[in-house]
Amino acid sequence: MTWKQCDYTGWGRVYHARGELARPERASALARIASQTPCPAIGQRRSYADGCLNDGGRALLTERLDRFLGFEEETGLLEVESGCKLADIVTHFGRRGWLPAVLPGTGFATVGGAIGMDVHGKNHHHVGSFGQHVESLTLALPDGPREVAPGDPLFAATIGGLGQTGPIIRATLRMQKIRGDVMMVTERRIPDLASYFDHLDASQATYTVGWIDATARGAALGRGILEEGETGPGLVPPAKRGTRVPLDAPHAALSGPVVRSFNAAYFRRVPERGRTVVKPLEDFFFPLDKIHDWNRLYGKRGFHQFQCVVPLAEREILRAMLKDVGTAGLASPLAVIKRMGAGRGGMMSFPTEGYTLAIDFPARAEAPEMIRRLIAMCFEAGGRVYLAKDAFAEASQMDAMYPERAEWAGILHSIDPGEAYATDLVRRLSLRSLP
Amino acid sequence: MTDTARETWLILGATSSMARALARKLAGRGATLLLAGRDMEDLEATAADCTARGATSAEAIRFDARDPESFPPILARMQALGGTPNAAVFVGSMPPQVEIDDDPAMLDGVVADSFTGPARLLHGLAPLLEAAGAGTIVGVSSVAGDRGRLGNYVYGAAKSGFTTYMSGLRNRLGRAGAHAITVKPGFVDTGMTWGLDGMFLVASPEAVADTILKSVSKRRNVVYTPFFWRYIMMIIRAVPEPIFRKLSI
């Protein structure tokens, strides 16, 4: 059978959808579905909210189309099917001295998803976003496959394009040569936000990311641990296979006092003078993937992630955000700060030069209001929220946050006037409305 | 490394997700792969995937269970590739029983796909294993072959024939130092079962592939996967006929 009625959710497990899903196992089956019943493609559903949902409609799962189609050692070009998981690429090509140029925080994301969200990684300040390293890709349009490459408006509409240009069949990635398949990671404590900005600005490392204690207040506001990583030759035991979270955790597991003490301990884990540790690639890039289904730690009601980027000059707004979050006592241990470069691959790409802050919140009753306040602050500062994670932004905020949105919607109208590829996210934020 | 230390695997029906999972795992340990099936475009993609994952070589070749003309080139290619010859058979077709009831001519195709086609090819391959005095043939049959049931007894009958063939082949190959394994999967999460009602205890294609490789190294004879299907089928076979004929399971 082609279609199966399924209930599914985004990674945060707050938004739900019910609809028919197809899971083609061959490119020819994908092409047939794409021409007869066009619908959005979804990968591993690692978008947090409704970017990977089509409630009441159909969608296409790419997970069985996950093959490596060819790799050229001379050029570093890797052609893969869109359902290929990034961790699979890291595992097989890392030991051969190659990595995808950009890796997000989870290796479970697919290549198709990484393109559709134009994901960024810990090296964004040097190499830009995922889409900037895509040589070409092939879309399954209703009238047949179409290969697009940089320079083609449809390519710019596809990178970061939230899947709105149709299912991606395959893509060719420009991989990056690495010095060895081991990560050398320097971790140091950062006492407060001002110091964080200084360290992020000064960091010359290939990979830089900061964990931030979103529960800290007063003088410790903005404290955290800065991680700087370089690849190198060496020997470490291979990454261990993951464990599963067997059941939904009770809500008390992430209550305010628990998170505060966890964060304090996590901060002190790194000695005061810092340290350098050696890790397998997977452990550095995908720290949470070892715990499969970690989203269940947030319990049945799920969680939200807020992520924004604000211009360099507006960085003090992050202080206001952290103050608000610290006072509300809602944050979870997962919070990340990073300085981004200017690199972005498409019209709707999230990355832009500035500071990005990401914080997880258990989906308690107070969470929506809290996150809406943060979105408003981001909006006032001329920043934008990441649509792969957004749950509460408003349609009226989109044109300021994503200035090319209307032009993008125009391109989409020419290939998909019936909005067959629309997802719940696209409808919620009226992203495809024409001027 | 001697030539026989290198393993060569013929995968019949290599477009199925179970076959693909097995091919990947074999590629990971450096096997030489010959991927046979009808959808050449898909086979080429799997061959490329296996090459990237470490196969010594991986190539696609046309195999149509209903077209015996497609068999000799496969046997010739296996001979030419050398190494210890092995094969894994994943072919078969399971049209809904009601369609066969409407068009009895479909029965021939089901039997050719699931039994006579692969059996005839394996009959040509067996001498290669006998000559090598090594190698394993894995025949993926089905629990459906253990007893004829209302829902799919034509498919079941063909698989039952294939199971019996595999049993005889094991008897024959064992005398020469080679081996044959009958694998009987229960429900597997493939394109064939996607969206079907009444699926339970569904196994992933990767889990089936793992079971197959383990069974090869342990020289098992008849393997149910997941294992508990052996007991489920034991019960189903034990139901007395007067009662069984009234059941619709």
Image (cartoon, rainbow, N blue to C red):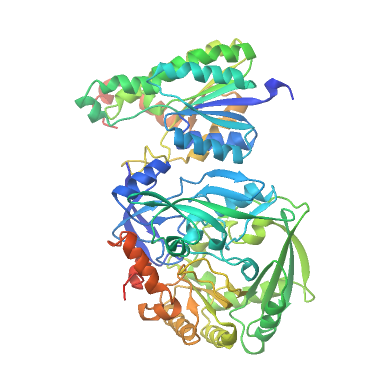
Quadrant of the rendered structure where residue B234 is?
top left
Q: Nearer the viewer, residue A298 or A198?
A: A198
Residue A219's spot in the image, x, y percent? 66, 89
At 59% from the left and 15% from the top, the residue drawn is B129
At 35% from the left and 64% from the top, the residue drawn is A412
Quadrant of the rendered structure where residue A55 is?
bottom left
Q: Nearer the viewer, residue B218 or A357?
A: A357
Residue B199's spot in the image, x, y percent? 36, 41
Residue at the extreme front of the image, as rendered: A151
At 39% from the left and 40% from the top, the residue drawn is B191
Residue B70's spot in the image, x, y percent? 44, 19
The quarter in which the N terminus of chain B is drawn is top right
Residue B19's spot in the image, x, y percent? 49, 33
The number of numbered badges drawn on the structure is 0
Question: Left or right: where does residue A265 sit relative to residue B62?
Answer: right
At 40% from the left and 77% from the top, the residue drawn is A398
Question: Left or right: where does residue B194 sit relative to residue B169?
Answer: left
Q: Can see residue B107?
A: yes
Q: Nearer the viewer, residue A16 or A69?
A: A69
